């Protein structure tokens, strides 16, 4: 359910950005909006390797879906749902948007690469998994 909501929100916001972001816009503080297209993975790594990125994204998405379906922990399911939704949102761009395998990015922060809702959800999900893992570790192991 979370993954589906993330994909929907990601695709709607990207469609709005494509329709209305002709020029970069500063919002407030470090935040702004600027339409860009990323043919690489996170932080533009592996730029131009769309076919490899698609295959890896499909495999990771299948694995995440399998693990999430078997999870009995709400926290784990939420984190995996965020990551899976983000991966599928960006995969949808590569396969269906017609920008030569690029992902639509539009959120800017000072001194940070441009990103989108899917990227944000992947990051938040990963942070939740890390925090969950640290909290579950035995107190003696944390020190």
Image: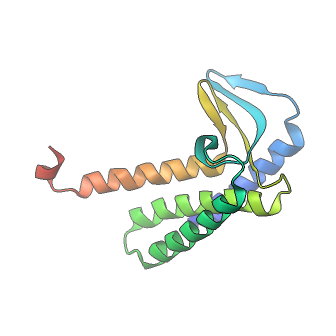
Q: Is residue 5 above or below residue 124?
A: below
Q: For this rendering, which residue is in front, 143 or 20?
A: 143
Give residue 67's quadrant in the image: bottom left
Q: Work out which quarter of the rendered image holds the N terminus and state it.
A: bottom right
Q: For this rendering, which residue is in front, 97 or 4?
A: 97
Q: State how the image is colored.
A: rainbow
Name the residue at 77% across, 55% down: 101
Name the residue at 16% across, 56% down: 138
Name the residue at 73% across, 62% down: 92
Left or right of residue 96, residue 38 in this image: left
Residue 98 appearing in the image = yes
Give residue 94's quadrant in the image: bottom right
Q: Is residue 60 above or below residue 82?
A: below
Residue reaching furthest to the left: 140
Q: Is residue 15 above or below residue 65?
A: above
Q: Give the x, y percent position of residue 29.
A: 62, 20
Residue 7 appearing in the image = no
- The number of numbered discs placed on residues in the rendered structure image is 0
Q: For this rendering, which residue is in front, 57 or 120?
A: 57
Q: Work out which quarter of the rendered image holds the C terminus and state it.
A: top left
Q: Give the x, y percent position of residue 139.
A: 14, 51
Left or right of residue 55, residue 70 in this image: left
Q: Give the x, y percent position of residue 76.
A: 40, 64
């Amino acid at each position: 359910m979370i993954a589906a909501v993330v994909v929907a929100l990601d695709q709607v916001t990207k469609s709005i950005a494509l329709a209305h972001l002709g020029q970069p816009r500063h919002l407030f503080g470090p935040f702004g909006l600027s339409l860009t297209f990323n043919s690489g993975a996170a932080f533009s790594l592996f730029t131009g390797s769309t076919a490899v990125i698609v295959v890896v994204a499909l495999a990771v998405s299948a694995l995440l879906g399998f693990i999430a379906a078997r999870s009995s922990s709400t926290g784990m399911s939420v984190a995996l749902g965020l990551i899976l939704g983000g991966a599928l949102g960006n995969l949808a761009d590569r396969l269906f948007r017609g920008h030569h395998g690029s992902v639509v990015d539009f959120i800017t922060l000072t001194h940070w690469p441009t990103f989108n809702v899917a990227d944000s959800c992947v990051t938040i999900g990963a942070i939740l998994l890390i925090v969950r893992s640290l909290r579950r570790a035995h107190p003696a192991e944390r020190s």
